[in-house]
Image (cartoon, helix red, strand yellow):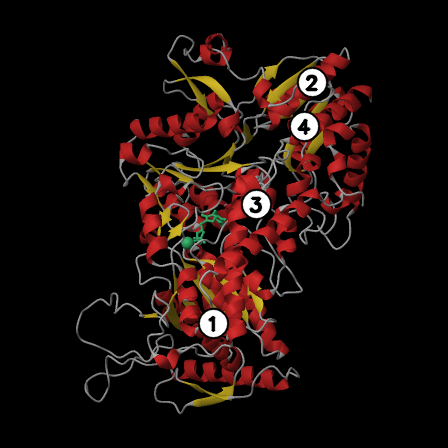
């Protein structure tokens, strides 16, 4: 009835930062970095090196790939448990769908609504050698657990002289922008945790990556914060190996070789970088190297340094606000280790220094336009 | 031991002195009994740093009937007595639920007949209908992709009764499902629409998601998504009001799910120990997204926790607008007259999906929801009461709903036509002044916009 009362109008929920630039298609859906065909998965060097080239593949979005990783983690380790707010029915993003039916409510359970409780509980389980995979419903709501992560999980091993550790702890949280999340459903808190010795911080860019990195994080003997760019849950689809596999932590990946400028990012930001590079290479003679950091901390500085020593230029991008962010750390490492090789100042393309603003998100974002401009500035310096 | 008491007493009299020295008129100079120390004469002091909210009573034991029992002397115990029986305390009887009228709108105890004028009652009812109509339209408009998000109050419309019982200057801290409070306060349909549409007339300047309302004029703090953060804030604001001597209080709404957060416990304890005139109002609607209350807590609801913190507590039928009204009125009197917090737990049922991002059929049956809304609907209960009073004519509803919908649609269409707030609002209000960083970033973005006007679709935004 109401449908009739409301005249149809243009949808207001356009993902503006993936709108075409000068007619060039943008965004995840068109990315050539994703294993969108069986052939691309079968020839992927990353998967071949793991001996996965000829194994069974299944089409999965990132949500399904994470679900698959959680299932494998539980199947292969009886001490693994998965819990958090609304996790039992599948979670608000459906990442834990089917797990409580398969493994029972003792291993897959809802918790009361308390993030400090969830992470503290997970620390306690991990301190007994169990594998606790805790979900924080949105990364924006991780701060009540800040104390448990920063003061407890991060220091558990060190403060006890390695009498105790919480290596079995993994905290998963959906993070970053979705186009309509505003202040509290869009944040990128990785720098807070990367600043803390003792925690690992991982951000995957795709379903295949998410599965392998999450399994690695769960099995890594250190507490890990695993931030999932929630826009990729449905938008990124790949042919993912169904086998049990891990991808290495603290190893950046060179996604595209290039000789004139190194472009670094992680998570969903990779797709904006890909688009910017396409535009630069269309409009200029330059060739760009693209690196996905994958693990934010401990950082694989060597891969970035090696690349910058080749190209002489660096552009770093992330959605989190610029000031005191991850890009600042990378810029500083690179000026320390590549000083004489640098041809131009390191460019940072980041979220603006404002709270993530709902209706201004398209200006806030380090979108392909801004990256494109930064790369050109770097090249023209 | 005696020295501990001496120390305590010195601290207390210092507190008293501090208060006396203060020029603030706020500290009501009522003598107060300190029941903390067995054996010592009751201490009289000025109400200052804290007040005891709950009478110190242990009805189960009395010294006279158990001559062997002695009261415990530790400073942290409250009138506890020694026992020689090894037993663990567990739940006591469930706290009763205060009700004024039954589901047919009949007042069950004539002494409880609501003391309101016909006009007041009708305004409340009209607001219930308007809230319902607005929710239907905005819910539907989200489904059409015209606004990005929405949360409805279906089944919880009786919350309006709490707003009606307050002074309009009492300060509100909400969670997000309190649009009814705003309606009752006089927030206009246009203001609701402008916020949900993030347009240039949105008081929040388009920065937050829909339903994150806030208005200084109506003393309603802006909604913040992180749960329970408003609870200790409400205690602090109430303490400030007490210092101002304003005879006003704070009301703080939250869900039974949010009550699991650490901030809930922190806030209640702060309010109790510091004597804050705040009404904590828990909307216990049975669910926190998919999590039923049985998985949220094992005690006697949220109410039992109030007692644990030494806070006067009442549980009410949250679908009975008059029970809510009466309880909030009484709570307000306690808060303002005695400078202490009160907890109200209103039992209701979330007929709505959690939000437009949620499909509740994934975790509860449609039948459960239908049964609930049929069995006990706060709107039809209020209508029945009005009809019993002869203040309402059958069929009048349809008229009101129709005109409310027309009003909402009109405001909606107008809101939709307006531009988004000017881009400069993205940079302002981060700090009281733009920082050098922000000035630089603003210039950078302005230059980009000039270069890529189509990409940035700047025509959607107001000019300045
Ligand atoms: C700190 C924090 N954690 C998680 C969330 C996500 N979240 C939003 S609403 C909600 C459920 C709240 O339930 P309840 O307090 O009972 O209120 P109701 O929705 O029933 O009115 C959750 C988990 C949040 N907003 N903030
Ligand atoms: Mg609830």
Crowding at dot 1, Cα within 10 Å, few <14 / some 14-19 / many 20+, comes out as: some
Q: Residue at x 23, y 81 (%)?
A: B61
Tell which of B59 and A298 is nearer to you.
Answer: B59
* Label 1, ligand 1: CB separation under 8 Å: no
Tell which of A169 and B53 is nearer to you.
Answer: B53
| Badge 3 and badge 4 in a common chain | yes
| Residue at disc 4, secondary structure | strand
| Residue at disc 2, secondary structure | loop
- Give the image quarter of residue A272: top right
Q: Tell me the quarter of the image containing the N terminus of chain B.
A: bottom left
Q: Which residue is mark 4?
A: A316
Furthest-bottom residue in this view: B41
| Badge 4 and badge 1 in a common chain | no
| Badge 3 and badge 2 in a common chain | yes
Percent across and percent down for residue B150 are 53, 46
- Give the image quarter of residue A243: top left
| Badge 2 and badge 1 in a common chain | no
Image position of A319 (left or right of B399):
right
Q: Nearer the viewer, mark 2 or mark 4?
A: 2
Q: Mark 2 — on which chain does it sit?
A: A
Give the spatial CA distance, label 3 vs label 2: 31 Å
Q: Which residue is mark 1?
A: B391
How many marks overall? 4
Q: Nearer the viewer, mark 2 or mark 1?
A: 1
Point out which mark residue A184 bears. Answer: 3
Percent across and percent down for residue B14 are 55, 83
Q: Which residue is mark 2?
A: A24
Give the spatial CA distance, label 2 vs label 4: 22 Å
Q: Nearer the viewer, mark 3 or mark 4?
A: 3
* Label 3, ligand 1: CB separation under 8 Å: yes
């Amino acid at each position: 009835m109401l449908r009739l009362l409301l005249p149809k109008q243009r949808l207001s929920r356009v993902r503006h930062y993936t709108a075409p630039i000068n007619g060039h298609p943008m965004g995840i859906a068109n990315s050539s970095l994703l294993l969108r065909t069986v052939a691309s998965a079968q020839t992927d060097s990353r998967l071949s090196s793991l001996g996965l080239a000829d194994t069974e593949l299944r089409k999965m979005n990132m949500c399904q790939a994470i679900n698959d990783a959680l299932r494998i983690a539980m199947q292969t380790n009886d001490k693994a448990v998965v819990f958090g707010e609304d996790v039992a029915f599948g979670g608000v993003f459906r990442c834990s769908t089917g797990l409580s039916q398969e493994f029972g409510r003792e291993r897959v359970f809802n918790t009361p609504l308390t993030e400090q409780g969830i992470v503290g509980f997970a620390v306690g389980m991990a301190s007994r050698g169990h594998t606790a995979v805790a979900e924080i419903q949105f990364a924006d709501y991780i701060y009540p657990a800040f104390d448990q992560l920063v003061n407890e999980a991060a220091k558990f091993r060190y403060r006890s002289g390695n009498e105790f550790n919480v290596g079995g702890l993994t905290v998963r949280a959906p993070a970053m922008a979705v186009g309509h999340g505003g202040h509290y459903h869009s944040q990128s808190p990785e720098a807070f945790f990367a600043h803390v010795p003792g925690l690992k911080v991982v951000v995957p860019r795709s379903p295949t990556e998410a599965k392998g990195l999450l399994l690695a994080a769960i099995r890594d003997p250190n507490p890990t914060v695993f931030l999932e760019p929630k826009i990729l849950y449905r938008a990124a689809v790949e042919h993912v190996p169904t086998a049990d596999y891990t991808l290495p932590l603290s190893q950046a990946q060179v996604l595209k070789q290039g000789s004139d400028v190194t472009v670094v990012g992680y998570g969903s930001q990779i797709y904006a970088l890909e688009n910017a590079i396409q535009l630069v290479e269309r409009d200029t003679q330059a060739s760009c190297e693209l690196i996905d950091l994958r693990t934010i901390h401990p950082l694989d500085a060597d891969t970035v340094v090696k690349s910058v020593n080749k190209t002489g230029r660096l552009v770093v991008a992330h959605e989190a606000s610029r000031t005191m962010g991850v890009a600042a750390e990378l810029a500083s490492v690179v000026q320390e280790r590549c000083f004489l090789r640098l041809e131009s100042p390191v460019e940072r393309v980041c979220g603006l220094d404002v709270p993530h603003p709902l209706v201004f998100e398209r200006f806030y974002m380090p979108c392909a336009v801004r990256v494109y401009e930064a790369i050109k500035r770097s090249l023209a310096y | 031991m005696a020295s501990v008491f001496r120390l305590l007493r010195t601290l207390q009299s210092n507190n008293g002195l501090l208060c006396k020295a203060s020029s603030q008129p706020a500290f009501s100079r009522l003598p107060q009994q300190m029941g903390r120390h067995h054996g010592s004469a009751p201490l009289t002091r000025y109400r200052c740093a804290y007040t005891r909210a709950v009478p110190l009573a242990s009805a189960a034991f009395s010294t006279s009937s158990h001559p062997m029992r002695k009261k415990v002397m530790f400073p942290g115990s409250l009138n506890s007595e020694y026992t020689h029986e090894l037993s663990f305390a567990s739940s006591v009887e469930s706290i009763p639920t205060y009700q004024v009228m039954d589901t047919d709108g009949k007042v069950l105890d004539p002494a409880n007949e609501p003391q309101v004028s016909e006009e007041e009652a009708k305004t409340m009812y009209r607001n219930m209908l308007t809230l319902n109509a607005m929710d239907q339209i905005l819910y539907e408009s989200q489904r059409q992709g015209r606004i990005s998000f929405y949360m409805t109050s279906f089944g919880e419309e009786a919350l309006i009764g709490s707003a009606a019982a307050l002074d309009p200057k009492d300060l509100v801290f909400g969670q997000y499902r309190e649009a009814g409070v705003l309606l009752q306060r006089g927030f206009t349909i246009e203001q609701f629409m402008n916020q949900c549409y993030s347009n240039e007339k949105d008081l929040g300047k388009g920065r937050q998601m829909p339903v994150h309302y806030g208005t200084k004029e109506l003393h309603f703090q802006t909604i913040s998504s992180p749960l329970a953060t408003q609870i200790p804030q409400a205690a602090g604001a109430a303490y400030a009001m007490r210092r101002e001597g304003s005879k006003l209080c704070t009301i703080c709404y939250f869900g039974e799910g949010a009550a699991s957060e650490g901030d809930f416990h922190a806030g209640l304890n702060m309010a109790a120990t510091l004597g804050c005139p705040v009404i904590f109002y828990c909307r216990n609607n049975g669910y926190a997204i998919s999590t039923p209350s049985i998985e949220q807590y094992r005690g006697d609801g949220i109410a039992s926790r109030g007692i644990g913190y030494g806070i006067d507590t009442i549980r009410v039928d949250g679908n009975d607008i008059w029970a809510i009204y009466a309880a909030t009125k009484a709570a307000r009197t306690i808060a303002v007259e005695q400078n202490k917090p009160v907890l109200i737990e209103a039992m209701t049922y979330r007929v709505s999906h959690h939000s437009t991002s949620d499909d509740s059929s994934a975790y509860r049956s449609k039948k459960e929801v239908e049964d609930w809304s049929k069995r006990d609907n706060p709107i039809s209960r209020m209508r029945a009461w009005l009809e019993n009073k002869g203040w309402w004519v059958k069929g009048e509803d349809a008229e009101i709903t129709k005109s409310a919908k027309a009003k909402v649609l009109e405001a909606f269409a107008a809101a939709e036509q307006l531009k988004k707030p000017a881009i400069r609002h993205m940079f302002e209000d981060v700090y009281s002044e733009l920082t050098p960083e922000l000035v630089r970033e603003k210039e950078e973005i302005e230059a980009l916009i000039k270069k890529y006007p189509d990409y940035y679709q700047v025509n959607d935004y107001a000019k300045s």
